[in-house]
Amino acid sequence: FSFSSSSSFSLPFKKTTIPSNRKASIQTFSVSYHNFVDFALDQTNFHTQLFPSPLQEKYNSMNSKDGKGVLSMMSFQASKIRLLRSLIIQTETMQVLDFAVFPKAEYDVPIFCANFFTSAKTNIVVLDLNPLHDIINQDDYKEKYFKSLIPLGLKYAEHFPWGGKLTSESIKFFSPIVIWTKFTSSPQKYDVLYSAFRDYYKVWLELIDAAVKETYEYQIFDNLEAQHRYLTWRAEKDPGQGVLKKLIGDTLAKDLLRSFLFNGVDELGSKKFDDYFPHYNGEEGTLNKKGGIIGKSFENRPWDARGEFLGR
Ligand code: BLA
């Protein structure tokens, strides 16, 4: 496999020079996630017609409280897509991408999820097609969407070692091909990450293209509830919350999370966090009497090379 960007793509990072008054003109590379989103929008437009989301009017661009950072938001919808939205944060010290695509409830297609946090030294990355339904116990759902994708996951697992322990509830939202990784900033790594993003997005577009509209009421409700559960998890527990609150304050951060990033959490269902996650007590590392997995776990990748879950 080759990861070099073909000529039709611009490199995902730009060269910057730290001013000499700060450090003796050391060159660093800071990634620009705008190229990632541009790629995704271009590709989506080949497959379907995107319409601006009503959210676009309110959520487009915002400055951080200190005036040194910019948050850029975009949102669209399409015939099979309830919401495609992206948030890019650029400050002097970090670059963040939160890009997700949520299918309409008539489709049980996974949720596309790219969450990249980049600071001068380190990167925290989740790239996945988050399964809508349980793929640890529900073999048919896993077969339907992930069986053929295992080689894609393996291709990138080589380049992106498992990122270590994570909030254990999260594992249920991840697929066997999840890229969960941390790495030291380098142009080579961004090149591979960009390649992974393109591959995963193209695969996701094929899934949504092929998806047949569900007509059975119960199944549609099941999809809707699964998506609402996902939104409820993320709106409440997203590890990016702390950063957002620091940048724009508690009130705006909460609004951004509930109305933009995880839009639907207040509309698609009436269940609350405790209804969906009764075992979760929020205390990191505490054991749960009822057998739910809480705290941080999964030091190593809990799927084997055939996509079988090892972490039961
Ligand atoms: C850390 N982000 C993490 C971690 C995960 C994720 C698994 C490791 C720590 C943990 O598990 O608590 C991401 N978790 C996810 C995703 C899902 C999930 C995508 O359950 C989906 C189901 N990250 C962002 C944004 C910011 C961000 C927008 O997505 C900043 C604005 C930052 N993520 C961020 C930071 C950390 C982190 C700073 C490290 C801090 C920490 O561990 O709490």
Image (cartoon, helix red, strand yellow):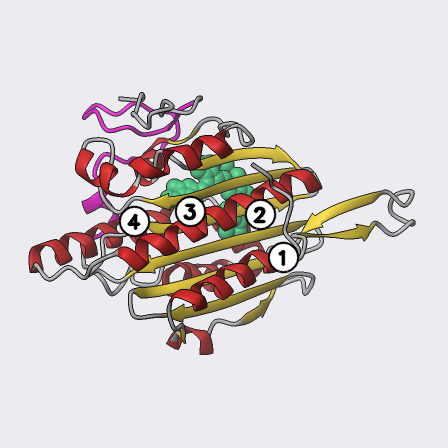
Any part of residue 182 in sight? yes
Sooner in the amino-acid sequence: mark 4 or mark 1: 1
Mark 3, residue position: 238
| CA gap, disc 3 and disc 1 | 31 Å
> Residue beneath label 2, please?
194
* Mark 4 touches mark 1? (CB < 8 Å): no
Residues at discs 2 and 1 in contact (Cβ within 8 Å): yes
Q: Nearer the viewer, mark 2 or mark 3?
A: 2
Tell me whether circle 2 and circle 3 mark residues in contact (CB < 8 Å): no
Tag 3, which secondary structure? loop
Mark 3 close to ligand 1, CB under 8 Å: yes
Numbered tag placed on residue 288 in the rendering: none
| Residue 167 in picture, x, y percent from top left | 39, 33
Tag 3 or tag 2, which sits nearer the N-term? 2
- Closer to the eye: label 3 or 1: 1
| Residue marked by disc 4 | 230
Q: CA distance from mark 2 to mark 3?
A: 23 Å
Q: State the extent of the magenta-drawn residues as a range.
A: 271-299
Q: Position of residue 35 (x, y in %)?
A: 60, 59
Q: Earlier in the sequence, mark 2 or mark 4?
A: 2
First in sequence, mark 3 or 1: give its number: 1
